[in-house]
């Protein structure tokens, strides 16, 4: 059992780390002259095709045991997937104007946005631990964005797109955990990515009409699809059932330090001690939010 949980934790960490390295690659593709919509379209299209192939070749159960998707399931998953496409689009737009380290911190605002959404949807006041976690996230964000200790100008467009990405990401988390849960994870991811591809194609239409640089598909599309849309769902959906929800949420937060570290080493982004302190506070908030779940797991074990 412990061995299974350890393997699950490692898989979850790999899945979250895959997301963490993604934005650095996106920023590097910008440096080569590719546009936001070329990059996003290439990632989502190749990711969708990759999941179609994985779904086709995966080991099938006997016909009488197979869980099929109805037209209604597909429609709901595709609609849910539009928020996934918007998250990538807003996030990649954000890092055109701000650093990766600030961008990932803004995306992590989904922590407190999720608390607010949960209290509104369930008409239930959040507990003391969650309220404490929200305040810790806000303090951590002020430190991590470095606006308190240095006279820096942060592009408001980047802040706006970053917060839109966090909002869309919050919607993605809720919809992905509530739509067509009876279907295999690869199949669910595939139909959600169809929705993401649809919305990204609409947004990228002017770029597609003007003429896309097809070299983006083999230069950056494959690696972005691999780390952004293929590996994370496989690692997370395999690993999450082996660990409890609280521990899983804590492990996935590794995405934050991984993203900042990648930006530091590959892009040369400067990260000072106050920013690292802010990042640690945000990670602490995620642990605080999941303390009850961890205690509950220990009591039932």
Image (tube, rainbow, N blue to C red):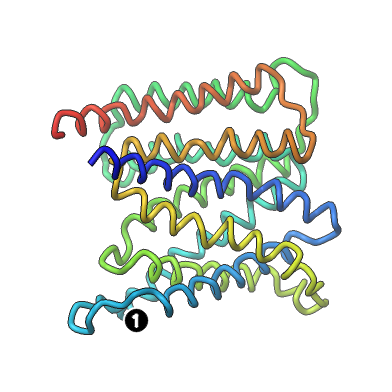
Q: Residue pushed farthest bottom? A: 63
Tally the marks.
Answer: 1
Q: Secondary structure at mark 1?
A: helix
Residue 197 drawn above or below residue 148: below
Residue position for label 1: 71
Q: Is residue 239 left or right of residue 29?
A: left
Q: Position of residue 30 (x, y in %)?
A: 80, 54
Find residue 259 and report its image quarter: top right
Residue at the spot 48% in from the left edge and 36% down from the top edge: 253
Residue at the spot 57% in from the left edge and 57% down from the top edge: 228
Find residue 197 and report its image quarter: bottom right
Q: Position of residue 274 (x, y in %)?
A: 65, 17
Along the viewing direction, whichever of 107 and 127 lies nearer the viewer = 107
> Considering the image in quadrants, where does the N terminus appear?
top left
Residue at the spot 63% in from the left edge and 46% down from the top edge: 21
Along the viewing direction, whichever of 180 and 265 lies nearer the viewer = 265
Residue 197 drawn above or below residue 292: below
Q: Position of residue 291 (x, y in %)?
A: 30, 26
Q: Position of residue 114 (x, y in %)?
A: 41, 41
Find residue 243 and report its image quarter: top left
Q: Residue pushed farthest front? A: 3
Q: Is residue 63 left or right of residue 200?
A: left
Along the viewing direction, whichever of 183 and 137 lies nearer the viewer = 183
């Amino acid at each position: 059992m412990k061995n299974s949980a350890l393997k699950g934790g490692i898989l979850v960490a790999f899945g979250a780390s895959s997301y963490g390295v993604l934005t650095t690659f996106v920023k590097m593709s910008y440096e080569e002259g590719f546009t936001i919509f070329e990059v996003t379209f290439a990632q989502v299209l190749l990711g969708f095709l990759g999941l179609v192939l994985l779904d086709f070749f995966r080991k099938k159960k006997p016909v009488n045991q197979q869980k099929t998707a109805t037209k209604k399931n597909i429609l709901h998953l595709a609609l849910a997937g539009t928020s996934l496409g918007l998250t990538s689009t807003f996030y990649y737009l954000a890092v055109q104007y701000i650093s990766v380290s600030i961008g990932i911190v803004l995306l992590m605002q989904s922590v407190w946005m999720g608390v607010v959404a949960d209290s509104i949807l369930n008409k239930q006041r959040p507990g003391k631990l969650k309220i404490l976690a929200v305040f810790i996230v806000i303090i951590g964000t002020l430190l991590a964005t470095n606006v308190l200790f240095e006279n820096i100008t942060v592009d408001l467009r980047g802040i706006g797109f970053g917060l839109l990405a966090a909002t869309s990401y919050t919607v993605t988390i809720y919809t992905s955990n509530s739509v067509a849960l009876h279907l295999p994870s690869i199949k669910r991811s595939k139909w959600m990515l169809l929705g993401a591809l649809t919305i990204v194609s609409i947004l990228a239409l002017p770029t597609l009409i003007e003429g896309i640089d097809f070299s983006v598909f083999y230069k950056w599309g494959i690696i972005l699809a691999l780390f952004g849309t293929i590996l994370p769902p496989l690692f997370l959906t395999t690993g999450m059932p082996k660990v409890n929800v609280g521990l899983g949420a804590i492990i996935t937060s590794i995405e934050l330090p991984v993203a900042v570290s990648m930006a530091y080493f590959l892009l040369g982004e400067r990260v000072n001690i106050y920013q690292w302190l802010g990042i640690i506070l945000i990670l602490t908030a995620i642990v605080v939010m999941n303390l009850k779940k961890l205690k509950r797991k220990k009591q039932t074990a």
